[in-house]
Amino acid sequence: MEETRQVGVTLHQEAADASGYAFRVAFDDSTIPELSTDESPPLGLGGGPDPSRLLVAAVANCLSASLLFALRKFHNAPGPLTTHATATLSRNAAGRWRVTHIHAQLRLAETAADHRQLERLLAQFEDFCIVTESVRQGVPVSVGVADAQGAHLHGAVAPAG
């Protein structure tokens, strides 16, 4: 029997006249505080993250958590990671905006030499990221990892800019 789980959210539109694009996101069956979202101008007022930013944040957060898990699994004691992620938005053939690429650049707080089994864990941590591996079914995602000194350790090099 296949194991499944469900997670849910409920959105409530915030505009009293129903003309805006701001929502309160409630995280079902949890005590997580609600999150305000909004479309970016000119469509919305930019009063919260828009869906594209939420998508890139989900990918970056999941990759960061997966890398931390892998580091700790191999008995490392990592300091705080820093992750910068960007989503490239482009128009498709029909002129509609789409997320066409996501790049996440993770940076360790230590040097590579400070970690056990680094090559092994870097080779597998992305596979455990449920969000990234799901998004990759439709959107290319590149990932790079560098150490505290900026040495490239894994994956794609961060794009310029």
Image (cartoon, helix red, strand yellow):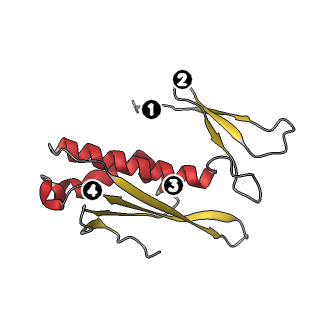
* Mark 2 residue type: Asp
Q: Distance between the residues labelled 2 and 3?
A: 24 Å
Q: Mark 3 points at which residue?
A: 56
77 to 86, vertically: above or below: above
Q: Name the residue under label 1.
A: 4
Q: How far apart are marks 2 and 4 (CA)?
A: 33 Å
Q: Mark 2 points at which residue?
A: 29
Which residue is located at x 69 percent, y 73 percent?
93
In the drawing, what numbered circle is on residue 108? Answer: 4
Of discs 2 and 1, which sits in the foreground? Answer: 2
* Image quadrant containing the N terminus: top left
Quarter of the image where one finds residue 37: top right
Q: In this view, does 122 lie to the left or right of 75?
A: right
Of discs 2 and 4, which sits in the foreground? Answer: 4
Q: Earlier in the sequence, mark 3 or mark 1?
A: 1
Please rate how many residues cluster around mark 1, counting C-alpha atoms within 10 Å: few if below 14, some from 14 to 19, many from 20.
few
Tag 3–tag 1 contact (CB < 8 Å):
no
